[in-house]
């Protein structure tokens, strides 16, 4: 992964997220998504099979764009998305090919009239500059991603954005989750609203570049926020907890919601609607009291004694 991004190869990788051994597990969590997040690839996130299909087509346009030229990952949940039977509306081959377009070379390795070096050694004099340029390209790619999203919407009517939300306009509490859990959390949020609790849900379509400003604006008016991580934090707070909290706390005008971290679904342990409703109930107490009423980090659905920290 690091070689591909360092050489700015516009590869598209469809990553069906699975748990990482040991112990051996073929089912899905977000361990491999998190493992790849700092490898210098653009990383897109999907919530269902239709999005996985759509984002794969868009990823070619993004990765190969002359202003980007960065390899791109399209994440989808193992089994819960990859092996789920759902209706998907594909484009015809001709329309899909026309949308993706012809591959445009840049610094071609096989153009012998304009020879270039790939994979050259760069020590302290230039290594830093290479990495800084890659970071700049990824951070600047948001405008290209949105441009491609808009072009795809004109073609299909399916509009995507860097972030995705459900009933956050008046929400006082919310769950942030990646992948298929976003759609499960919507079901739980609807149950909470039947009880008079103003619950909402948020996710991102772009893990790298991370949409700090957009997400911060989405979440700034909340009173309490549960940030879910489907990967072992291995001695720290969850990765999404750290990044989402940074986004919401650095946004101008934020109400500084009470934030908490829930670890769940490792090795594809079920995250049920009941679990999600319990999380909403807990953070609703946080919102009412204006402070944490439980440990900051909790493991959901773990066999044996409850595990929590801080």
Image: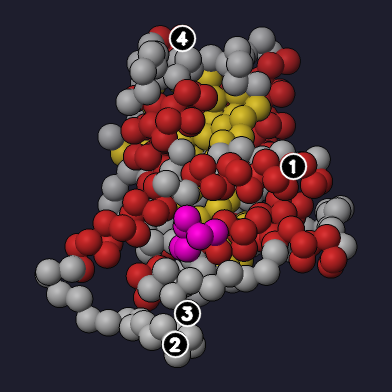
Q: Which residue is mark 1?
A: 153
Q: Is residue 5 left or right of residue 180?
A: left
| Mark 3 burial class by Cα count in 10 Å: few <14, some 14-19, many 20+ | few
Label 4 with label 3: CB-CB less than 8 Å? no
Viewer-side residue, 108 vs 273 = 108
Label ID, residue 274: none
Q: Give the label, 4 or 3, closer to the camera.
A: 3
Q: Earlier in the sequence, mark 2 or mark 3?
A: 3
Residue lying at the far bottom of the rendered structure: 112
The local secondary structure at tag 4 comes to: helix
Q: Give the label, 2 or 3, closer to the camera.
A: 2
Q: Earlier in the sequence, mark 2 or mark 4?
A: 2
The local secondary structure at tag 3 comes to: loop
Q: Which residue is mark 3?
A: 108
| Mark 4 burial class by Cα count in 10 Å: few <14, some 14-19, many 20+ | few
The residues tagged by marks 4 and 3 sit, at their Cα atoms, a distance apart of 60 Å
Q: Residue at x 34, y 51 (%)?
A: 136
Residue 6 x/y as whole percent: 35, 70
């Amino acid at each position: 992964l690091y070689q591909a991004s360092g050489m700015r190869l516009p590869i598209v990788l469809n990553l069906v997220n699975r748990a990482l051994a040991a112990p051996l597990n073929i089912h899905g969590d977000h361990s491999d998504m998190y493992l790849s997040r700092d490898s210098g690839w653009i990383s897109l996130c999907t919530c269902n099979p239709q999005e996985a299909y759509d984002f794969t087509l868009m990823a070619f346009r993004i990765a190969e764009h002359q202003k980007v030229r960065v390899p791109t990952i399209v994440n989808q949940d193992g089994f819960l998305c990859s092996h789920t039977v759902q209706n998907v509306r594909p484009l015809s081959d001709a329309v899909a090919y026309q949308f993706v377009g012809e591959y445009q070379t840049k610094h071609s390795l096989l153009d012998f009239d304009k020879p270039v070096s790939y994979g050259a050694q760069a020590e302290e004099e230039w290594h830093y500059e290479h990495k800084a340029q890659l970071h700049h390209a990824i951070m600047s790619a948001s405008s290209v991603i949105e441009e491609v999203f808009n072009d795809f919407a004109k073609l299909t009517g399916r509009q995507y954005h860097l972030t995705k939300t459900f009933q956050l306009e008046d929400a006082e509490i919310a769950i942030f989750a990646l992948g298929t859990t976003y759609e499960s959390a919507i079901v739980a949020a609807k149950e909470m609203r039947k009880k008079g609790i103003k619950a909402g849900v948020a996710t991102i379509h772009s893990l790298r570049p991370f949409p700090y400003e957009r997400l911060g604006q989405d979440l700034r008016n909340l009173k309490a926020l549960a940030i879910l991580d489907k990967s072992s934090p291995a001695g720290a707070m969850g990765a999404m907890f750290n990044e989402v909290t940074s986004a919401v706390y650095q946004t101008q005008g934020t109400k500084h919601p009470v934030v908490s971290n829930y670890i769940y679904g490792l090795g594809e342990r079920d995250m049920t609607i009941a679990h999600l409703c319990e999380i909403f109930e807990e953070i609703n107490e946080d919102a009412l009291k204006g402070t944490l009423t439980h440990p900051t980090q909790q493991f959901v659905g773990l066999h044996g004694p409850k595990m929590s920290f801080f």
